[in-house]
Amino acid sequence: MKYEVVIGLEVHVELLTRCKLFCSCPNSFVPEPNVNTCPICLGFPGTLPQMSSEALQQALIAAVALNCEVALYSYFDRKNYFYPDMPKGYQISQYFVPLGSNGHLMIKDDRGENNKVVIERVHMEEDAGKLIHAPGSGASGSTSMVDYNRAGVPLIEIVTGPDLRSPLEARRYLEKLKSVMQYTRVSDCKMEEGSLRCDANVSLRLSGSQPYGTKTELKNMNSFRAVEKSLEHEIKRQAATLERGDNVITQTLRWDENTQETIVMRGKLEAQDYRCFADPELAPIKLKAEEVEKAREALPEMAEARAQRFINDYKLPEYDAGVLTASRSLADYFESCLKLYNNPKEVSNWVMGEICAHLNNAGLDAGQCPFQPEDMAELLKMIDDDLINGKIAKEVLEKAFLSGKSPRQVVEEENLVQISDHSELEAIVNQVIKDNPDSIESYRGGKTRALGFLVGQVMKATGGKANPQLVNELLIKKIDG
Amino acid sequence: MELRKTTVHRVAEAVLQGEITAHQLIDITLKNCGVLNEGLNIFTAVAGVDASEQARAVDQKIKQGKKLPLAGIPVVVKDDLCYGVLPTSLGSSAFSEFISPVTATAVERLMDAGAVVIGKTNLDDMGQGSTTLSSPRGATANPWQAERTAGSAGAAAVATGICMLAVESDSGGALRQGASHCGVAGLRPTTGRVSRYGLNAHCSSFARVGVTAFSCENISGVLDIISGFDERDAATAVCRDGIQENIKAPGSEDITIGYPVTVFDFLEPELREVFEQARDEFAGHGYKIKEIELGLLREGLQAYYVIALAEASSSHARFDGIRFGKTGAADNLHNMYFQSRAEILGQEARRRSIFGTFLLGKGNYGRYYRQASKIWQMVRWEFEGALKDCDLLMLPTSKNLPRPLQGQSSFLDQWSDDLFCAPVSLSGLPALTIPAGQIEQHPVGMQLVGPPFSEKTLLNVGSASEHKN
Amino acid sequence: MDDRSAGLDKAIEAIKIGVSDPERNQLHIELDQFLDWLEPMLGVDTGDQEGLLFSHDAVNVLREDSPRQSDPAEIQEAAPSFAGGFYLVPKIME
């Protein structure tokens, strides 16, 4: 390609704390507006911010998880600007000294090679509220509505260097970042719910040339897919501009999900002057080097390492290892099952198949799975013990998942125990043979497929409870006999 | 009961012993209030019924056997300190009916100790000033000389005998200059000693909550009650494990007072005389006097204003007319901001916010703000250095007599009045102002400044000097 | 227009305070006076020290997280324009 793509991302991630950053209002989503508010987060005169210990702890974990150097002395600044969703007329943020700097994440580039993406800074700040613009005219059409529930929720901002070379790399970086944030339990990173937000800077330069081209900023992408799409779109637009011999101009563009296009939000403006200075109402943060090291040591095993271990120790295929480690809670679930039932591939099949499907349908995370690892072990043992067959087991799992009952309880209550009794099955087999003379003929004529049909008939007659292997044996014996 | 001639301790004892009920005491106080306030313009709100109710509640608690150290003591509160029962005007006409959801920690603690809030006192525009001249309700007149300002309305209330204690803010010197101009005692405490929660500070770096009273003894009686750790103000964390009082032995011969000769570069001659007399009196009472130099008073004053204005521009940005205050009937967001903010902030507050914005702007931050923060550090070093050789320092409180109510004075003249107070604010040290003498029947105060948490020493020295005068 | 004047107009715009023309003119004069007044401070050799950022010596003042719900109704009474659970502002054009 003639041009080299240069992308940098600025990501805001909401921390999973119980309270807001500077007050004790709950950090939780509620549908009613302005209920999670208090005089502090509304900026009432006379109030002072009170820093959350949990937010600092989580920000520290995030910084070390992103391989950052951690500032042993940092503090908060006031970033001054007006907007109705900003109660104090300034945002409390770490402008001069970010908590974390000079970190990195490794991703695979388009050719499958490692690309080290530099993370320039990780800093704490407070979120703003939300503005709702009611459509239409008249009274409601002449006002915008402000909801401050989100104002003061703790965020970390994670800024990369200009190190991403394609929209796909940008997407991979976001996936990796999300995985790290989730593995460290710092954030749930749900882009559609706004707990992860991403702005992208993109520019083009002639391949092999040194200076960066003029960049544009992209906003309003609400999925990783949208980030990738909008970058692709913007790169094409910039390339076309350059091809025409025009200059790319500095501007901010908004991604329109409906038209799949970027729209200019604002043109070249003088850079906003935020007039930052240290917030005198908060105390600085001092960390000991040992504290930082302790946080580094306490980091959980991340997805990639865990997947590799699954391949090495459990002899799982790469595909399985990838799926199972996509979220920490799913991998935890899998390993908990393994502790109780030591057959990795068998457990993997059930977790990737049935469990993931049911979790998905119910909109649940593996950490909330009502079908506990104990239940999984019990279910698989019942199959081993010929108490139920695989097909019934799926039914049992579903019922247990939905009702919260144990698999054994479901099997007993619904009388699903497999029929392995010879005489009982023999009677049914005889009946099926009697009822299906044509199939018997076909089978004898060499069409072995007809046997499957006959087995099916027996299963049908027993409500699926017949031991399929036994039925097979009996049928062959009877017909061939 | 003549409140000026007694002590907080004695009055509280009388109430606790049942010699007078809190309710009776407050009723008398409220009746006096009208007469004594005549022509002075002390109050933004008088508690009336609410004060009577508070007093009744105090009597009830006493009946239940509560030993309230401030039983029935009438106090006034400067109107930049939030108190959820009366309106908190903050020094803005747009907030004349604002009921704050917050009550300042200091006020809460006084009330828990049995004190009764009888009113909120007048203040400069958004609490910015040391004269009350910029108050949207007009200035408070001086009880000693009604054609001059009181400096602070709380000090005027104490001086007239309306109340026994005034809770006030002090950033650049409002509390101290008020006390000085009204001939009473006023304490600006060490950074972190008294919670600022509930104070609408235009400048959090320097705003402190202090007390004005007729005597040092009365300040002593209340200091412990309002002091100490408050989870809601981070600066008080230095008191989390209790207050490490820095108390000097009471013998005057053991105390060295630093006497900065550099103040004479700025003092008006008549005030110079008072200051020299005060020094001689201290010497006469056995204190050792040591001449020192404080070379950065003027620059400290200027640095104070750079930082105070910069902070005010940011701290007052919350006044956008959306969650509180008044909003103009604007048809678009731009106009809403410009109209609401112009209405909430008076002329002085507008000037300060606009200049503060300028000072923090690109290209100016380094030249002004950073330089000021370095001067801040140097002034602090200078005071610390002076206190290595001395136990405390004496300084004038004001460089001139209070400003006339009618006279024309420029904003810079008024800001310059903080010359001896603002540098002390930068130092973070406690400062007590006490009457030093008089010029033509007009009281003149002086400051005693000590090391961190030396308030008790300052009050002891101040108290001794009151009794000798 | 010199830097000071331009800076002052920018400051008024940035801090969003409506001022009349006479007040603006007066502010231009006063800013000059103020900045001239600051000259002695600007002339001090402050060396390469950092400067002070905080008036207090407290560090790591952290609150334990235990969520508390306030009563929003009491707070909302202070709002000049409030309806349907929302604070209202003039329509913002995106």
Image: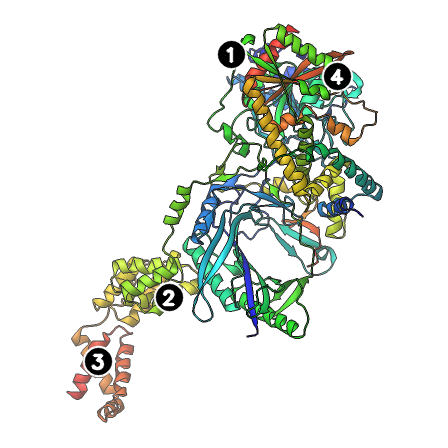
The residue carrying mark 4 is B36
Image spot of residue B129 (x, y percent) = 72, 29
Q: Secondary structure at mark 4?
A: helix
Q: Secondary structure at mark 2?
A: helix
The residue carrying mark 2 is A322
| Image vertical order of residue B327 relative to residue B243, above or below | below
Q: Is residue A261 visible?
A: yes
In the figure, is residue A365 to the left or right of B120? left
The residue carrying mark 1 is B249
Q: Residue at x 60, y 72 (%)?
A: A236
Badge 4 crowding class, 10 Å Cα cut-off, few under 14, some 14 to 19, many 20 or more, is some
Q: Residue A472 got which mark?
A: 3
Quarter of the picture holding the N terminus of chain A: bottom right
In the figure, is residue A358 to the left or right of C55? left
Type of the residue with mark 1: Ala
Q: Are marks 2 and 1 on the same chain?
A: no
* Chain designation of label 2: A
Image spot of residue B215 (x, y percent) = 63, 13
Label 3 near label 4: C-beta < 8 Å?
no
Type of the residue with mark 4: Leu
Badge 2 crowding class, 10 Å Cα cut-off, few under 14, some 14 to 19, many 20 or more, is some
| Cα distance between the residues tagged 2 and 4 | 83 Å
Q: Secondary structure at mark 1?
A: loop
| Cα distance between the residues tagged 1 and 4 | 40 Å
| Cα distance between the residues tagged 2 and 3 | 37 Å
Nearest the viewer among A103 and B75 is A103
Type of the residue with mark 2: Gly
Q: Residue A427 got which mark?
A: none
Nearest the viewer among B289 and A158 is B289
